[in-house]
């Protein structure tokens, strides 16, 4: 999945016009490991510890945590995006995950 940004985006001295998310190549093991890792980072949060996979994959914090692992860009990369790009990524990845649940 490729996302074109609304404007060129500068991060750590590099300019980006978009990003390849490659979520279509995601394996169950990668998703499972990301969920396990995310839950362990938030171990004191009972809601996250007991969250079902379906609720986590629609959580924007988890989406960007997962994408940071998948794309090798830190979470701060995504947090610095313009709102349309930030929300566009959340929407497209959430839809991708939701369609995978059916």
Image (spheres, rainbow, N blue to C red):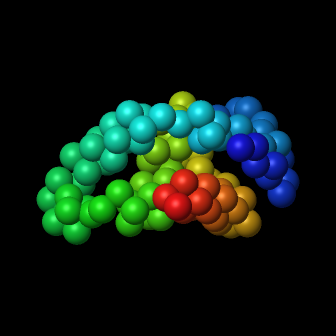
User: Residue farthest to the front?
Assistant: 102
Question: Would you place residue 51 above or below residue 68 in this image?
Answer: below
Q: Is residue 41 visible?
A: no
Q: Quadrant of residue 49?
A: bottom left
Say whether residue 30 is left or right of residue 48: right
Residue 16 position in % (x across, y down): 77, 39
Residue at image coords 46%, 45%? 66
Image x and y of residue 31, in percent: 41, 41
Query: Residue 59 occupies which quadrant of the picture?
Result: bottom left
Q: Using residue 52 as the reference point, say whether residue 72 is left or right of it.
A: right
Total tally of numbered discs in the picture: 0
Q: Nearer the viewer, residue 94 or 42?
A: 94
Q: Identify which residue is drawn at 52% across, 61% down.
A: 102
Q: Quadrant of residue 100?
A: bottom right
User: Residue 73's x, y, as percent?
Assistant: 56, 36
Can I make out residue 85 in this image? yes
**Residue closest to the eye, 24 or 16:** 24
In the image, residue 71 lies at what x, y percent? 58, 34
Q: What quarter of the picture does the N terminus occupy?
A: top right
Query: Can you say whether 81 is above or below 1 in the image?
Result: below
Q: Residue at x 81, y 49 (%)?
A: 4
């Amino acid at each position: 999945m490729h996302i074109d940004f609304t404007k060129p985006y500068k991060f750590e001295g590099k300019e980006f016009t978009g990003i390849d998310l490659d979520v279509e190549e995601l394996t169950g093991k990668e998703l499972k490991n990301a969920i396990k890792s995310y839950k362990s980072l938030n171990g004191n949060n009972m809601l996250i510890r007991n969250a079902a996979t379906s609720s986590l994959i629609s959580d924007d914090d988890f989406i960007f945590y997962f994408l940071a692992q998948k794309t090798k860009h830190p979470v701060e990369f995504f947090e610095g995006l313009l709102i349309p790009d930030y929300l566009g990524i959340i929407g497209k990845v959430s839809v991708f995950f939701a369609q995978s649940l059916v």
